[in-house]
């Protein structure tokens, strides 16, 4: 009982495919771009609408203090921020604390705030 499988022939030439030839054809190592080439690519990208990414300025507000506030206080804080010209609730909060310390006239608290705000 002779049960041999027939060979699959991809093309008529019946050559063995060399793995080295395939790897050589597909793994062309690209040389790194020069500074001039990088600037050209950046200029072309800018015309297409891609802009260079810049690191965002890190916020000094890194400690989160979760507090409960009364209903409507969030809107009041936002309106107060608009009135004093601050850009965020955190900045409004800083201004309010500074004014409160100023009204108390406490030198120690004023020094603490100055040390924190550096």
Image (cartoon, rainbow, N blue to C red):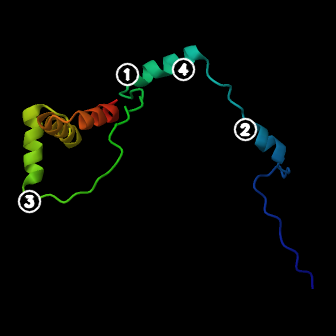
Q: Earlier along the polypeptide chain: callout 1 or callout 2?
A: 2
Mark 3 or mark 4: whose residue is earlier in sequence: 4
Nearer the camera: disc 3 or disc 4: 3
Q: What element carries label 1?
A: helix
Indicate which disc, 1 or 4, sits on the residue closer to the N terminus.
Answer: 4
> Taking 90 as reference, is 8 above or below it?
below
Pick whichever, 56 or 4, lies toward us: 56
Marking on residue 38:
4
Labels 3, 1: front one: 3
Are the residues at dot 1 and dot 2 in contact (C-beta closer than 8 Å)? no
Q: Is residue 75 above or below residue 84?
A: below
Dividing the picture into quarters, in which one does residue 118 lie? top left
How far is the residue under mark 1 from the one under mark 4? 14 Å
Q: Is residue 8 left or right of residue 52?
A: right
For image coordinates 92% across by 81% down, the residue present is 2
In the rendered view, would you say 32 is above or below 6? above
Can you identify the residue that label 2 sits on? Answer: 27
Nearest to N terminus: mark 3 or mark 2:
2
Name the spot of residue 18 as percent of width and height, x first: 84, 47
């Amino acid at each position: 009982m002779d049960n041999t499988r027939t060979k699959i022939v991809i093309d008529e030439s019946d050559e063995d495919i060399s793995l080295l030839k395939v790897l050589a054809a597909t793994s062309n190592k690209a040389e790194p771009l020069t500074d001039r080439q990088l600037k050209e690519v950046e200029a072309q990208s800018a015309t297409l609408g891609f802009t260079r990414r810049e690191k965002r300025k890190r916020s000094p507000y890194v400690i989160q203090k979760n507090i409960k506030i009364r209903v409507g206080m969030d809107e009041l804080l936002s309106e107060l921020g608009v009135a004093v010209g601050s850009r965020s609730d955190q900045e409004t909060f800083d201004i309010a604390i500074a004014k409160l310390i100023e009204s108390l006239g406490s030198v120690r608290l004023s020094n603490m705030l100055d040390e924190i705000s550096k």
